[in-house]
Image (spheres, rainbow, N blue to C red):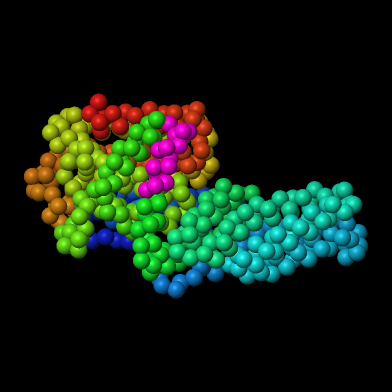
Amino acid sequence: MKTDMTRGRKVPATQEAFGSDRLKSIANGISAPIQMLQTAHRTIGNRAVQRMVEQSHPKIKEHPGQGAAIGPVVQRLEDSDSFKKSTPVMLRPMNKIKNVDSALVDYHKLAENDYAKRSTQLEKIITECNTYVDNKPKKDLVPGVNELKRQAIVEKSVIELIAQAEGKSGTQKFYTMVEAQDKWLLVKGDVPGLGGIVFGPMFDKIIVELRATPGAIEEVLQHEADQLKAIADDPDTPDITKQVLAEVLGNMGEIKMNALNPGARFTNDKEKQQGVQEKYVVNHGLNAPGGSAERLGSLTHEFTHVSISEKFDNTPLFFAFDPSTSEDEVMQLVNKRHQHLDKLISTLASGGFSQEQLSLLNMKLEYPRKGGPGGVQRYITNFFQSKKITAQEKQKAESLVNKGMDNTVIEFDTVINQMLIYMHQWKIAMDNPFYKLLRTVAEDAYNYRMGA
């Protein structure tokens, strides 16, 4: 339903969509701070889990035939001079280590985006390192050679998957690139410069190809929903996450999925005339810099909006409370959720997350508290102008806004459920203080939706 970020396109006031903050991140060397750039507005929902790690180049929009961004060369592994400094030896040209030198020099001569050749050359570097170490090497050089080998193995684990993806077509190309990106997110800090790989344009190109293949997009979207089902079936998934996923996936028969900027809403008249029979439309972003954690968290966010609509049936704004709830009761709910958000934010300081993860979680926790003209009031105005809500509904909602109602009545459940998916995908320890509190808050919100 809302959209808490990405793509930064302005939306007409009459468009039936909620907006959210956009995150763009820049990978600089091993790691980089997350920078929030602007607010994007579109469909009611999570604007694709913040662009958690949009690397060193801006996102390139999809255009048929567009290739990956070229950009400046990103130094990977260590350069030849650095390697030689770590492996000093007299008469180096006469030493067997010269073969390692040559393999490394040849690697850095390759085109930045020629992943197939890079993968092959990385294997050669590994082989030369093994040969050197196995053939009576100078012992003081072995640590430097082994470190180069370690870097090459790590880098190859990513480069090889990208090369494999480029050699495939259709949905398998997408799935393999997803595997490469997820691997990269795990190891990008282990090799100098590896974090500079730009996945966005590669995914853009694949998505264009999928759209040109009948049934391919639909298959991928179903696979994404199936991934959530797999999380629900995972014995390591906590009970509350299983319950949430059972809840939101239970509405799949009422949902038409599209591969567009993330958002959720009622099916409009034009779509009905085109044959869409489902009650809701959920748009899902397939290009997510944060990998599977970002994509699946975003999808859970959007599915939660649908679940809220089904539970409360409170206008196309998808308010997360029963329409008969008194104003005082609504404000009690808002204040309670503010307290939950404050506790979650303070608990983040206990540790257990990378800087990128912390930045994303902080943005998520701030998003529901957005108020004023840029918060829920904007949605009320836009929905009234587009004739999605009546004058009476507008007046009732604005009376609550005047009392302090903010986005918590729309975006609280969605981001809480979204972060449950983050925790699972990031493999955060169950005893992590933030994760423990998040599960408690999620249980409270779930019970409220269930009327318990």
Q: Residue at x 9, y 49 (%)?
A: 390
Query: Is residue 200 visible to the viewer in this orientation of the structure?
Result: no
The percent coordinates of residue 177 (x first, y second) are 51, 58
Which residue is most to the left? 392
Q: Position of residue 326 (x, y in %)?
A: 14, 31
Chief secondary structure of the magenta span?
helix
Residue 275 appears in the figure: yes
- On the image, the x and y values in percent for residue 176 come to 51, 57
**Left-right relation of 32 to 370:** right
Q: Is residue 446 placed above or below 355 in the rendered structure?
A: above
Taking the spot 39% from the left edge, 30% from the top edge, the residue there is: 239
Disc tally is 0
- Quarter where residue 97 is shown: bottom right
Whether 310 is drawn above or below 5: the answer is above
Quarter of the image where one finds residue 336 = top left
Residue 72 magenta-highlighted: no
State left or right for residue 93 relative to residue 216.
right
Q: Residue furthest top?
A: 452
Residue 104 position in % (x across, y down): 74, 63
The image quadrant that residue 73 belongs to is bottom right
Identify the residue at image location x=11%, y=44%: 393
Magenta span has 234?
Answer: yes
- Magenta residues span 225-238
Observer-nearest of 394 and 149: 149
Q: Residue at x 87, y 48 (%)?
A: 139
Quick one: quadrant of the C terminus? top left
Along the line of sight, the residue nearer the viewer: 152 or 217: 217
